[in-house]
Structure formats: C-alpha cells, structure tokens
C-alpha cells in the first residue's frame, strides 16, 4: 500500500512539474512578445514569423500574429507580412491560429486598402418604354488577372421581366474588357432601380466589390435612364 501511495505521489509530482514548466515557458514567451512589441528589433519579422511557425503553444502563436501585425503597422512594413499571414490563414492546422491570421489581414486591409483594380461601366440599349425589351450592358475590366469575377443584377422589380441570366461568372485578363449583357422586358410604366454588382476575387482573402445603380424612368414613349456611381 505504501508503495502505491509513493507511486501515485511520484506521478502527481511529475505532472505538477510539467505544468509548472509549461506555465513558465508560456510566461517567458509572453514576456518576450511584450518586450518585442514595445522595442522591436531590426529583424522582428523573421523572429516573430519563426515563433508563429514553430512554437508548440497555439496561444503563443496567436499572440505572435497580433504582435507582428501591430509592429508592422507602426513601422510601415505590412507589405512584407501579408503573404505570410495569408499562408497561415490558408494552411495552418490550428483553427484559432488561422482565424487570427485572417483577422489580421483584414485589419491591414482596413488600415491600408488595396488600390482599386476593377472597373464597371453600365449602359442601356433599346427604347425605354412600356412593353419594350432593353439590354443592360456591363463593361468590366481589371488591371490584373482575375480567375473569379462575378457580375450581375442584385434584384429586379416585379414589373421588369428578366429574359436572360441576371448574373454571370467570368475570367478576366489584365486590362481586357468583357461585356455582360442581360435582356429585360419593361411591362409597366414607372421609376425603377437596377442595382448591379461586380465582385473580383483575387485569392481566398482579398477581393473587391463595385456597386452601381441604373435608374430607369419607363414611360409610354421616350423614357430615360441614368447611372448612380458609388
């Protein structure tokens, strides 16, 4: 019986030692991150990326991501860390670490938005009068290649009948324009709004959305339209 008590006590003691050591390591890493955040070294990016990739504690890795972003924002180095954060957001095995990486890319984009890369030009072809069929034309371009672009009409009034697909997916090559066309039948007179959206997905994190509106005044004859830009 005494030997059993001794064995149990030994196991408990070993567990306590492991826990204490783990707490010391976490505390040490936390203090290191705090010191780094206050006084970043010249090679802080490399040091923090190493912690984010290799530390065994997911919590420390999360803190490392926030520390890295905070310093990079202050130092103007965000362009040097965005691709790294994206890789973590895409591929890391830990969900909380991936979430932290996504959140920090989003923070960087809010502070330093990407330059606009897409363009959307809307027009109407046809007579804008009751009973006629018109074509909504959307001329879309991008300054870079885009494999996943979506353009279309968000919603239609019940008085306007859609005769073709109101939305389409396209691939865009840099500076090459494509035309999206949707045929609409105007069944009644009145004033209507056609909201049109272009969404460009550059990768699994970065995207761009452009929204515009066509305002239609449908009459018995000689109606008109104009485009509202954001």
Image: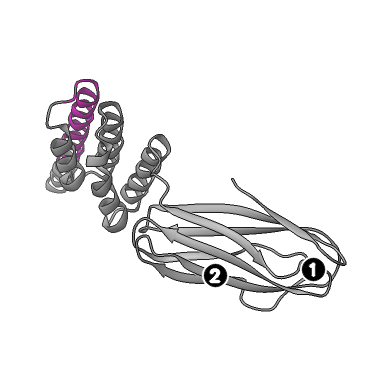
| Most frequent secondary structure within the magenta stretch | helix
Where is residue 106 drawn, in percent x and y? 40, 43
Eyeballing the image, is 196 above or below 62?
A: below
Position of the C terminus, as image quadrant, is top right
State which quadrant residue 32 falls in: top left
Say few, some or many: other residues with alpha carbon within 10 Å of mark 1 (under 14 / 14 to 19 / 20 or more): few
Residue denoted by label 1? 158
| Magenta stretch contains residue 92 | no
Where is residue 12 drawn, in percent x and y? 19, 41
Left or right: 29 as drawn, with respect to 89? left
Between residues 188 and 206, which one lies in front from this camera angle? Answer: 188
Magenta stretch: give its range.
Answer: 14-40
Task: Identify the secondary structure beneath mark 1.
Answer: loop
| Magenta stretch contains residue 35 | yes
Using the rendered image of the protein, determine whether residue 9 is visible from the camera's viewpoint.
Answer: no
* Sequence-earlier tag: 1 or 2: 1
Where is residue 180 drawn, in percent x and y? 54, 70
Where is residue 99 drawn, in percent x and y? 37, 48
Give me the residue at 38% from left, 37% from top: 112
Give me the residue at 44% from left, 65% from top: 177
Task: Identify the secondary structure beneath mark 2.
Answer: strand
Between residues 181 and 10, which one lies in front from this camera angle? Answer: 181
In the displayed image of the protein, which residue is found farthest to the top?
Answer: 38
Coloring applied to the structure = one colour
Eyeballing the image, is 6 above or below 132?
A: above
Eyeballing the image, is 33 above or below 190?
A: above
In the displayed image of the protein, which residue is found farthest to the bottom?
Answer: 163
**CA–CA distance in space, label 1 to label 2:** 22 Å
Contact flag, marks 1 and 2 (Cβ < 8 Å): no
Residue denoted by label 2? 180
Give me the residue at 52% from left, 59% from top: 198
């Amino acid at each position: 019986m005494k030997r059993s008590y001794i064995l149990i006590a030994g196991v408990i003691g070993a567990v306590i030692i492991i826990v204490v050591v783990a707490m010391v390591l976490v505390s040490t890493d936390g203090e290191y991150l705090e010191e780094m955040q206050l006084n970043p070294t010249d090679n802080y990016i490399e040091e923090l990326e190493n912690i984010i990739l290799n530390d065994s504690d997911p919590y420390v890795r999360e803190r490392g991501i926030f520390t890295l972003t905070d310093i990079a924002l202050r130092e103007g180095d965000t362009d040097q860390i965005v691709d790294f954060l994206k890789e973590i957001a895409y591929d890391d095995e830990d969900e909380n670490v991936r979430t932290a990486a996504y959140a920090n890319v989003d923070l960087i984009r809010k502070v330093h938005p990407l330059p606009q890369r897409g363009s959307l030009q809307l027009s109407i072809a046809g007579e804008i009068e009751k009973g006629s069929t018109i074509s909504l034309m959307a001329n879309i371009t991008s300054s870079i290649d885009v494999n996943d672009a979506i353009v279309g009409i968000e919603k239609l009034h019940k008085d306007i009948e859609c005769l073709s697909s109101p939305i389409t997916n396209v691939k865009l090559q840099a500076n090459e324009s494509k035309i999206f066309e949707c045929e609409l039948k105007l069944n009644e007179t009145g004033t209507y709004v056609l909201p049109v959206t272009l969404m460009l997905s550059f990768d699994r994190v970065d995207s761009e959305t452009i929204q515009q509106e066509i305002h239609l005044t449908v009459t018995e004859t000689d109606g008109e339209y104009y485009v509202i830009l954001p």
